[in-house]
Amino acid sequence: MALLSSTWHTLPTEIKLAIVDNLDLNATRVFSRVDAQTYKICVPSIFKSVGIGSLVLLQRFLENVPRTYCHYIQELDLCTRPGSNDEQSVHHHPRAASDAVFSILIASSRLKRLALRMAGSLDKNVITPFTYLQELKILTITNCSEEAHSPLSERLVVSIAATTPSLEQLFLDRITRSKLHAPELESVYPYVPLVLGDDDIPDHHILGSELSLPSLLRIPTLKKLTIRDTHLGDSRWTTVPVACRLEVLDLGSCYHETEEFNGLCTERIMAAVGPTVNEFSLTTSVSDTVFATPAVTPLPRLRKLHISPFFPVESVVDTMSNLAGSPIESLSMQCYEDDVVDVCSALEDFLSLRVERGPDFYKKLARIDVSVAENNQSISDNEIEATKRLQEFCRDLRLSSAVGKAASESCSFLQGSSPLGPSRSNSNSFLDSGDRPLVYLPRRASTL
């Protein structure tokens, strides 16, 4: 053992770092306990990807982990919701979350990916650190609280996004409209929550006071935009000067509004950014007003189309017909187990229409995939037969096709599908699988 330790310490630092980089997180943790020098070598790998599952765990992290270690964080998944027994302490310290988030972000200057899961809005001071996050390209902001009680202001979110210098991918979920930008929604039916008191958020140096959601299109570096469970009825989507070249657009629907209204909102945003979009996700159907004619389609570069499980199955054929002017090469459709037969039937109807219309109708289409949300139910004979028929039809038309289970999205912040991608499964977790506080704080070597 002594000989091995001696050999290890004679290696150049570059080789030591290369060895540690090839270890998984658990192996790195074990290896870091060999001695103080080895621990120091392992610190960058241990803190490369960090997940913190509650405000109390964040506060413990800041109290126990040397602030200089934050410099090694490249991926951070951060939640400010109170832990199971923390509600009372957080209630008496309303600025605690804002101060804690500010502290970790200002120290994490090498961040490349960040997921902020906020329990409602934070203080405007959390905007400041984003100015210094020069390497941050992927940002997720989600409200993990009830929108009616703890809304997350669109003004805060837009200011944060616009302040991030190199932002390329933005994922937003459950963002609440501000009364400053949507006074027409107050005291009308249907009820849409509005944020009050966010007029203290300072003007942005480029956007000024116009911090409504459509101003996201003025961020020149933005390439991918996802907005879910958010009201998209702002008329400024059609008038805002578009400065970005969006390649991927993923729009959900607002559960406060009707399907027809959500569809109109989707069409409006598609028309605004369509010329550059090559990948799009649909939750609502689209009309044939401006989409069906190739000469005027607002999506001239659309190559990949994704249809969400919330999309009305009965609208598949009409919507696909209305998007025929786009050069779609790949169609993927997600559905729930109960809808498998109907979805396969709808896709067969679409393919039959493609045969009837001739070779110019979806002539670039090469692939159709169906992914089924995973559950514990066994697959019925009808579902098996429906998928076989669809795949045989695709083979007859020389189309590639796959039908299978979709990976389920875990409610855990550090497992399953996530905006931070698969690398987060190797993150330094501060939340255990039972959603109980679990803090891994590496022992401090006495020589550090």
Image: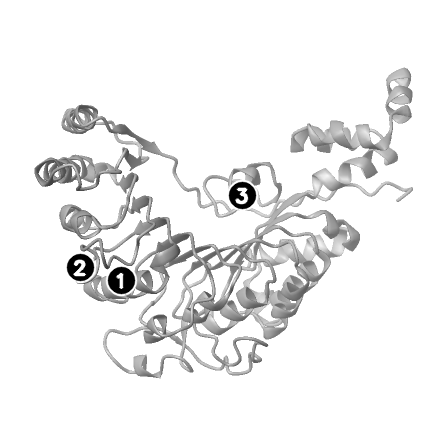
Q: What residue sits right under mark 3 in the picture?
A: 414
Amino acid carrying label 3: it is: Leu
Report helix, strand or loop for mark 3: loop
Picture coordinates of residue 242, whole percent (x, y): 43, 67
Task: Compare marks 2 and 3 and give the one earlier in the sequence.
Answer: 2
Q: Among all residues in the image, which is located at the extreme left?
A: 356
Labels 3, 1: front one: 1
Q: Is residue 165 above or below residue 382?
A: below
* SS for dot 2: loop
The answer to which image quadrant residue 404 occupies is top left
Is 221 in front, or is 412?
221
Residue 414: x %, y % from top left: 53, 43
- In which quadrant of the rendered view does residue 162 lie? bottom right
Report how far apart the C-alphas of labels 2 and 3 lie in the structure. 39 Å
Position of the N terminus, as image quadrant, is: top right
For badge 2, the amino acid type reads Ser
The answer to whether any part of residue 255 appears in the image is: no
Marks 3/1: CA distance? Answer: 34 Å
Q: Position of residue 239 (x, y in %)?
A: 36, 74
Of 306 and 289, nearer the camera is: 289
Badge 2: residue crowd in 10 Å (few <14, some 14–19, many ≥20) = some
Image vertical order of residue 38 relative to residue 225, above or below:
above
User: Do the numbered discs 2 and 1 sit on residues whose CB atoms are within 8 Å?
Assistant: yes
Mark 2 or 3, closer to the camera: 2
Residue denoted by label 1: 267
Q: Earlier in the sequence, mark 2 or mark 1?
A: 1
